[in-house]
Amino acid sequence: MKACPLGINIPGFIRYLREGSVNEAYSKIRESNCLASICGRICSAPCEKACILNKENAPINIRALERFAGDFGKDKVTRLPISKDSKKIAIIGSGPCGLYSAWALIKKGYRVTVFESLEKPGGVLRYGVPEFRIPKRVLDSDINDIKIEGLEIVPNCFFGQTLSFDDLLQNDFKAILIATGAAIPKYLDIPGVNLAGVYYGEEFLMRVNLMKSNIFSRQIPTFPLGNKIAIIGSGNTALDCARASVRLGREVTLIFRRSEDEMRVKTIERDYAKEEGIKFEPLTRPIEVLASNKNFVKGLKCVRLDYTEQDESGKWQLEEVPDSQFTIEADTIVVAVGHRPNSNIQKFYPSIELDEDGSIMVDADTGMTSLNGVFAAGNVVTNAQPLIRTLGAGKDIADKIDNYLKAQKK
């Protein structure tokens, strides 16, 4: 329990499952987590790493149990008792941090409105994770429960253009939370990345998620996509792109600089990818995207790497293997080497201070930005973090906003 940023009563809900009381198990989880089915699928599960049975190499599969409880349990969801005179809070962004902090603030009695720039809420959960990992019906179910409890969501609202801080202040919002996440891709600086047929991971997954599938076009992408796809990266985004491509009937190669054991994904996810036929090229660095005579991708030139010596921190260094260049045949490249905070709101409000990596700077004690009454939390502050850490940030910022608003009464 101490390892879970949300403090879920893990022994409690597992005990209910052992007794066959699935509904009670789900209710126990939902005391601390409004996104049980989501976490049960993609949580990094720090609780499992802290499980005492790790001493026997047999930790309890808590994530799978949470998924089962979230999918098959039911909880009586009703509108929470929120007074019309309660203070209003605006949240910009309906990703995991925005949704969780909204739910936590509603439970504290505030009137919360979430403003989302896209058509539907969910942020990265809807547009950045493929359907086979988070089914849309599961996401919609969790969000609808929060809406029943009192959350208002305003879609198609691009903050800074269609709405401003002044608009919110005029509508009597007492606090504003920026929770826009970190979905801006990091770019790869090698020749040929500007060719047709090169996508970035976040863009690629959004295109896949926006595909309108039906009985006649289930396997036909609605954007240009070759038959041989090279994915550059070793994190969850890269693996999601690779597995989504396989489901579109493509031949996929995953290219990354480190060894397979150093991939930033759960081992079981890596094993799934191999079972699905994805080819792995570890200890490999891309050096050039090759062009056809029509300026489309026709291949990826790479070089092999090997470990040499450790640096001062004990990390092994990599060097190119002499005369090891080779070419991977590909007509589509997906670059998924990381992402940056979505702090574009600073373009409209230059007084919001940013850190060197582009994340929004906040006061460590209050969570407030350089603008009074404007808070920020989640990956827009911390850059990339696992889902459960992002939800934990939503929980913490809800407490800080609550303390701020209570202090205003004095």
Image: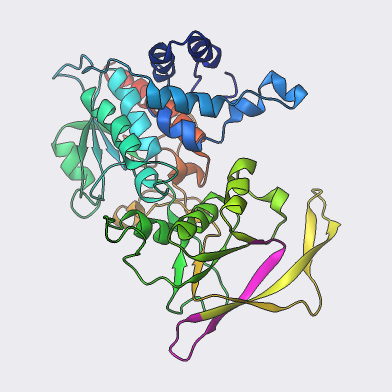
**Is 176 drawn above or below residue 79 in the view shown?**
below
Residue 215 point in image, percent of width and height: 27, 55
**Is 324 drawn above or below residue 36 in the view shown?**
below
Tell me where the magenta segment starts and ends, as one range: 280-297
Can residue 121 be seen from the camera position used here? yes
**Left or right: 114, with 60 as reference point:** left
Residue 1 point in image, percent of width and height: 57, 18
Can residue 266 be seen from the camera position used here? no
Q: What is the residue that sits farthest to the top in this orientation?
A: 19
Quarter holding residue 337:
bottom right
Colouring scheme applied when the structure was drawn: rainbow
**Is 334 drawn above or below residue 10 in the view shown?**
below
Q: Residue 283 in magenta?
A: yes
Q: What is the residue that sits farthest to the front in this orientation?
A: 216
Of 350 and 231, the residue lying toward us: 231
Q: What is the residue that sits farthest to the right in this orientation?
A: 309
Residue 34 point in image, percent of width and height: 37, 25
Quarter holding residue 282:
bottom right
Of 210 and 251, the residue lying toward us: 251
Which residue is pictured at 19% across the width and 37% down the height? 169
**Left or right: 309, with 200 as reference point:** right
Which residue is pictured at 51% across the width and 24% down the height? 65
Residue 317 point in image, percent of width and height: 79, 59
Q: Residue 367 in magenta?
A: no
Which residue is pictured at 31% across the width and 52% down the height? 349
Of 159 and 242, the residue lying toward us: 242
> Split into 4 quadrants, where in the image is the C terminus?
top left
Q: What is the residue that sits farthest to the bottom in this orientation?
A: 293
